[in-house]
Image (cartoon, rainbow, N blue to C red):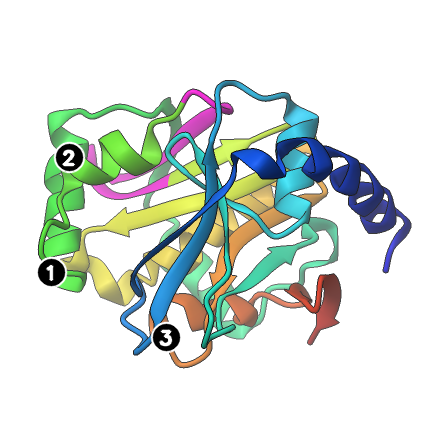
Amino acid sequence: MSVYDRQCEAEFVRLQSRLDRYFINMSMECPYQLPYTATFYQALFGPITDRIMELFLAAGYRRNGNSLYTMRCAHCNQCIPIRLHPAEFKPNRNQRRTLKKNSDLSVHFNSVQMSEENLNLCEQFLSSRYPQKNNTALGYYSGFFLNHIVTSLELHYRKNGQLLGNGIIDIGENWMNAVYFYFDTSESARSLGTFNILTMIDFCLQKNIQYLYLGYYIKNVPGMEYKTQFRPCYLRQNESWGFHL
């Protein structure tokens, strides 16, 4: 374990002792369509400091709206937190191709907004990729993307002004958290999910951000499994971040 992770762990233990009483277990159908009941250990928060969010991310927690959570599923442990250290990253041949393929796109940072343009693209993406009951763009924005906890931004990807993809991120002084990415599914050949991560890595390098959290790696779930193609990466297992080639 690195010096950084040891320090974060020591601080988080003290933080956790004060906040554990506010967390509850919430069980529901697995959002990743695995055949298990998912249990979210979560609590609602108001605004928190940059450092507190950093400690939660380093401890493997995720953000959903104004909630912070970790998974405590009784019969499954396949949701594995994954992060990158941007300064160590080396793109492979396919990733270099993806950069070239998307060199015609413009990239802009924006505040997180429930604009008609965003909602329409998100709705099209959800209908195509995740057509479960009650999966709506309005629900994702109001209950998932928007929050009062930390600073969040959108990464817009456009061609000739048309929105092709949108990445929702949380950002701090020394960390970036990838919350969600949706895109025009008719543009699947562009590998926009990969391009989004490559763009975040580049921004982290420009701003000297040392830790990029990509959410969960889940083996055999295509929308989650590809994240380990960004190497080297780190997986959090058995309460510790480990190097993964």
Instruction: Find residue 138 and name its label.
Output: 2
Determine the residue positioned at 11% across, 49% down.
134
Tag 1, which secondary structure? Answer: loop
Say which label, 1 or 3, has the lower sequence index: 1
Which quadrant would residue 206 be assigned to in this image? top right
Q: Quadrant of the C terminus?
A: bottom right
Kind of residue at badge 2? Leu
Residue 70 visible in the snapshot = yes
Kind of residue at badge 3? Val
Determine the residue positioned at 33% across, 34% down.
145
Tag 2, which secondary structure? Answer: helix
Residue 209 visible in the snapshot = no
Determine the residue positioned at 37% across, 63% down.
38
Q: Which residue is mark 1?
A: 131
Q: Is residue 99 left or right of residue 189?
A: right
128 w.r.t. 76: above or below: above
Instruction: State the CA–CA distance, disc 1 to disc 3.
Output: 16 Å
Q: Which residue is mark 3?
A: 221
Q: Which residues are magenta?
A: 148-167
Q: What secondary structure prevails in the magenta region?
A: strand
Q: Residues within 10 Å of mark 2 (few under 14, many from 20)?
A: some
